[in-house]
Image: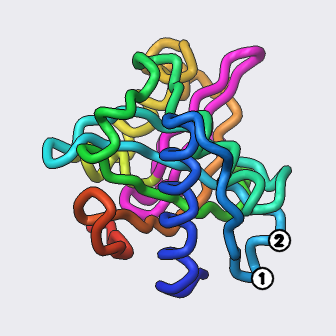
Amino acid sequence: MFSDKEGEAAVKAARMIIEAKVKGDKYPDIDYPDRFDKKMGVFVTINKHPTGDLRGCIGYPEPIFTLKMALEKAAESATNDPRFPPLGEDELSGIVVEVTLLTPPEEIDYENPDELIQKINCGKDGLIISRGPYKGLLLPQVPVEHDWDEDEFLSHTCRKAGLTAKSWRKGDCSVEKFQGEIFAEKEPVGEIIKKELK
């Protein structure tokens, strides 16, 4: 989907926005690749280095903004993820920035739980599960990082939505899947690589 150069541009842009937001500086003028003018979904993740502990993750799964606008909004918001205290300036040298560029979510049509499991691929798909006002999303890298199978992935996405773990088995949840390409710093302000999910 994206070249290494485009992925590198996305991560560098996210890092610049994060640093400017935390320091209270004016946002820099960023020269984006042309493709970033298209509407796309994106998530920006901030992890502690070298532990890999999550420090913030915010994004837009639907292609409602241009990629450059979604990237800037997500990077800014990730510094103030409501699950954590606001990111401090003293933390900037101890974090790595990760950007996941997303395909549009597609609803999965299924008759029963077994068929649903067959239509999900851990290591490739991200999930969105919703029922009424409840909605939860997990990125494609999450089940790989936790060594979950498809059943566990569905259950944890339900929990993220505020539902019971096995709500997906009742057949009254909407389940969507999407794919993502992940680019990340290897170390703070370091080399940017494309992450391959095993």
Q: Amino acid at mark 1?
A: Asp
Depicted 146 relative to depicted 118: above or below: above
Quadrant (top left, top right, bottom left, bottom right) of the N terminus: bottom right
Q: Position of residue 50 (x, y in %)?
A: 14, 48
Q: Quadrant of the C terminus?
A: bottom left
Q: Nearer the viewer, residue 160 or 167?
A: 160
Residue 177 in picture, x, y percent from top left: 61, 52
- Residue 3, picture quadrant: bottom right
Q: Nearer the viewer, residue 160 or 152?
A: 160
Whether residue 171 is visible:
yes
In percent of width and height, residue 24 lies at 58, 34
Q: Which residue is mark 1?
A: 34
In the image, residue 197 above or below residue 48: below
Residue 60 shows in the view: no
Question: In the image, what residue occupies the spot 39% across and 39% down?
Answer: 153
C-alpha separation, residue under disc 2 versus residue under disc 1: 6 Å
Q: Are marks 2 and 1 in contact (CB under 8 Å)?
A: yes
The residue at 40%/43% (across/down) is 46
Secondary structure type for disc 1: helix
Determine the residue positioned at 56% across, 67% down.
Answer: 10
Residue 5 lies, with reference to residue 77, above or below; the image says: below
In this view, which residue lies farthest toward the front? Answer: 25
Give the residues in magenta: 110-139
Name the amino acid type tagged 2.
Asp
Q: Quadrant of residue 87?
A: top left
Give the label on residue 37, or none. Answer: 2
Q: Reply yes or no: does residue 126 show up in magenta.
A: yes
